[in-house]
Amino acid sequence: MLPDELRPAGIITRGAAAVIDLLVVCALMGSAYVGSMFLQLLFDPGSFSFESPAVKLSVSVLIGLSMLYLTVCWASSGRTVGAIMMGIRLVTPRHGLVRWPLAALRAFLCVLFAFGLLWVAVDRRRRSLQDIVLRTAVVYDWQPNTPLIDPHTTAGQ
């Protein structure tokens, strides 16, 4: 895949991918809650009751799970479920995969400062505030199995 073929993704596409990813994380949280209820029912059926989860715990789990989900997806393939569905990918300036520390930092910034995505609407290069700070880009890429260029392994060739 040549870098010239990659166009920056716009606000609508990136926003839709973010909503899909939020739904994925919420589904994971719901599954964990239902699983914990089944375990409680299995091991202590006499005292079983559906209790509302604590708000602070739920928000903490949502933030932590979101950051873990984004980090793993971006560092392993550059794509989340939402990105796959919308045909986009996160890349470095040389169109390679981001490394784990950068993916984790970007996930932290995206989860805690989600409003930074809105900058895509006004930036002529379609960059979010996170992209500007970390020198990353989100580009259209409809070829999910195409390997990305890894500048660290191809530098000597």
Image (cartoon, helix red, strand yellow):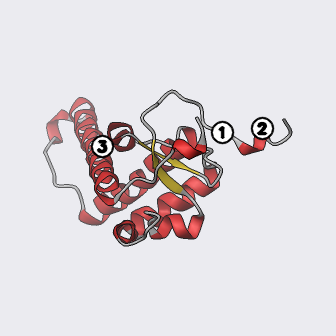
Looking at the picture, how far across and down is residue 84, in whole percent? 38, 37
Side of 20 where 154 appears, left or right: right
- Do callouts 1 and 2 mark residues in contact (Cβ within 8 Å)? yes
Task: Report crowding for label 2: few under 14, some 14 to 19, many 20 or more residues within 10 A (C-alpha).
Answer: few
Which residue does the image show at 61% across and 57% down from the upper left? Answer: 102
> Which corner quadrant of the image does residue 115 belong to?
bottom left
Of circles 3 and 1, the one toward us is 1
Q: Residue 41 carries which label?
A: none
Which residue does the image show at 81% across and 42% down from the upper left? Answer: 155
Count the labels in the image. Answer: 3
Report how far apart the C-alphas of labels 3 and 1 lie in the structure: 28 Å
Q: Work out which quarter of the rendered image holds the N terminus and state it.
A: top right
> Which corner quadrant of the image does residue 82 belong to?
top left
Mark before the other along the chain sequence, 1 or 2: 1
- Do callouts 3 and 2 mark residues in contact (Cβ within 8 Å)? no
Report how far apart the C-alphas of labels 1 and 2 lie in the structure: 8 Å
Residue identified by numbered label 2 = 154
Report how far apart the C-alphas of labels 3 and 2 lie in the structure: 34 Å
Q: Residue 24 carries which label?
A: 3
Mark before the other along the chain sequence, 3 or 1: 3
Residue identified by numbered label 1 = 149
Relative to 96, say whether 137 is above or below.
Answer: below
Give amino acid for label 3: Val
| Helix, strand or loop under label 1 | loop
Looking at the picture, how far across and down is residue 83, in whole percent? 38, 43
Looking at the picture, how far across and down is residue 28, in whole percent? 31, 41
